[in-house]
Image (cartoon, rainbow, N blue to C red):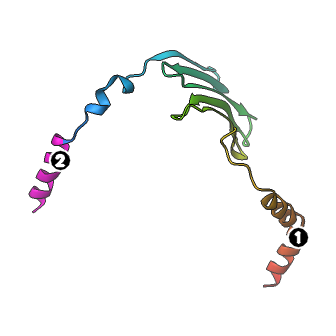
Amino acid sequence: MKFLIVLAVAVACASADVSHILTPDYQVPIVRSDFKNNPDGTGFNYAFESGNGIVQEAQGVVKNPNSEAATLEVKGNVKYTAPDGTPVELYYVANEDGYQPTGSHVPKVPEHVLRAQEYIASHTPFVQTVAKKV
């Protein structure tokens, strides 16, 4: 039985149509590629640009490198054109506070959610007091 399953998977893989992968649309040249790594391990820079207009750049730096609280902060951006022709630009920071993207296509946090977060933050001592009693 196991042999028949393996045989069926092998036949399916062999007969799969992968011709779309070999078309020129999927063969995109890299126009520019740069990478620099600080020898002391405190940071890096990289950038690349492809022939179809995708551009990505990032810089990373270690904050507080000689302490136990050392953290990596990466700032970067990505630019490309969406299939519908819309230019997309994404900027981001990733650090101890998490991943923080910004861009015209990134949804904004609704105002009522921001107000709720402020309310929760301002009433945290009350919540902690109630939680201790329970």
Is residue 62 positioned above or below 97 on the image?
Answer: above
Residue 63 image offset from top left, x and y in percent: 74, 34
Please provide the residue range marked out in magenta: 1-15
Disc 1 designates what residue? 125
Examine the image and state in which quarter residue 16 appears: top left
Position of residue 31 in the picture relative to residue 103 (left or right): left
Q: Callout 1: few (<14), some (14-19), or many (20+) C-alpha neighbours within 10 Å?
A: few
Location of the N terminus by quadrant is: bottom left
Instruction: Determine which residue is flagged by label 2.
Output: 12
Q: Position of residue 34 (x, y in %)?
A: 56, 17
**Secondary structure state at the residue bearing disc 2:** helix
In the picture, measured across the screen, residue 33 lies left or right of residue 96, that is left
Q: Nearer the viewer, mark 2 or mark 1?
A: 2
9 vs 15: above or below: below
Question: What is the spatial separation of the Cα atoms under label 2 and label 1, in whole angstroms?
Answer: 61 Å
3 magenta-colored: yes
Q: Among all residues in the image, which is located at the extreme bottom?
A: 134
Q: Quadrant of residue 20?
A: top left
Tell me which label, 2 or 1, sits earlier in the chain. Answer: 2
The residue depicted at 88 percent of the width and 69 percent of the height is: 123
Total marks in image: 2
For the point 54% across and 22% down, the residue is 53
Q: Is residue 6 magenta?
A: yes
